[in-house]
Image: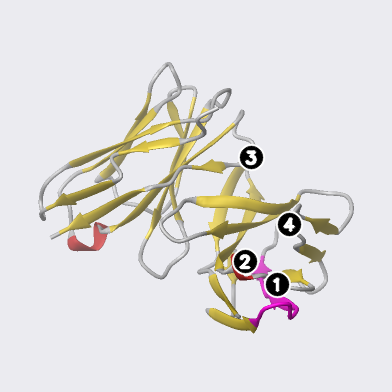
Amino acid sequence: DAGVTQSPTHLIKTRGQQVTLRCSPKSGHDTVSWYQQALGQGPQFIFQYYEEEERQRGNFPDRFSGHQFPNYSSELNVNALLLGDSALYLCASSWDRGNEQFFGPGTRLTVL
Amino acid sequence: AQSVTQLDSQVPVFEEAPVELRCNYSSSVSVYLFWYVQYPNQGLQLLLKYLSGSTLVESINGFEAEFNKSQTSFHLRKPSVHISDTAEYFCAVIFHSGGYQKVTFGIGTKLQVIP
């Protein structure tokens, strides 16, 4: 079992650009949640996808959007990047919106 | 308001000494409680969780946490720490509200084990 995988590992973008991050859930999991972890902070919940729909959303602007595919993998898209979007983006998967979430290693996004 | 507080940003402790990492929450609804550990440049790993039942929960590597509803706390303890326990520890709470489960993390506590 490969666990939760995320790509890319690191990414450098400039302000105003757009970025797409990818996540493959743990085998058998159908729910994917995305978190933003700024330096020195705890993870902040962005949104959760289940059955290819956004089921819950945290306090993030519409510049943050996502998608879940039929194979349960997911993408996080961020438009019009700001310097403050620099963070570690974590993906977590679970079964049927369950409580036990398994986290991927994250994607480190740097916005210059 | 629903919130999670980890008062200690850093906790230095000598090897083989006991440690307690504190977590308090504020909630008017029922909760599930978790502790996650994050090693440098890695994602989060679930350490232990409280969903229901016994208020004392244990992990496989010697950590334990106790849910105290009256004090709204879920402190993490270990009687004797090892160098390999050096990491950042996050308390997380799921607040049950309106059919949705919102996960809120604390800001984390860095545990530094000193040889």
State the residue position of label 2. B85
Secondary structure beneath label 2: helix
Q: In the picture shown, does residue A80 fall above or below B87?
A: above
The chain under label 1 reads B
Among all residues in the image, which is located at the extreme right? B54
Q: Chain of mark 4?
A: B
- Check contact, mark 2 vs mark 1: CB within 8 A: yes
Mark 1: which secondary structure? loop
User: Which residue is found at the position 16% from the left and 43% from the top?
Assistant: A18
Residue B75: x and y in percent read 73, 70
Q: Which residue is mark 3?
A: B99
Report in which chain the residue with disc 2 lies: B
How far apart, in angstroms, are the residues tagged by discs 2 and 1?
A: 6 Å
| Residue B87 vertical placement versus B93 (above, below) | below
Q: Which residue is mark 4?
A: B61
Tell me whether the residue at label 2 lies in contact with that at label 4, contact meaning CB atoms closer than 8 angstroms.
yes
Cα–Cα span, label 4 and label 3: 34 Å
Which of discs 3 and 2 lies nearer the camera? The answer is 2
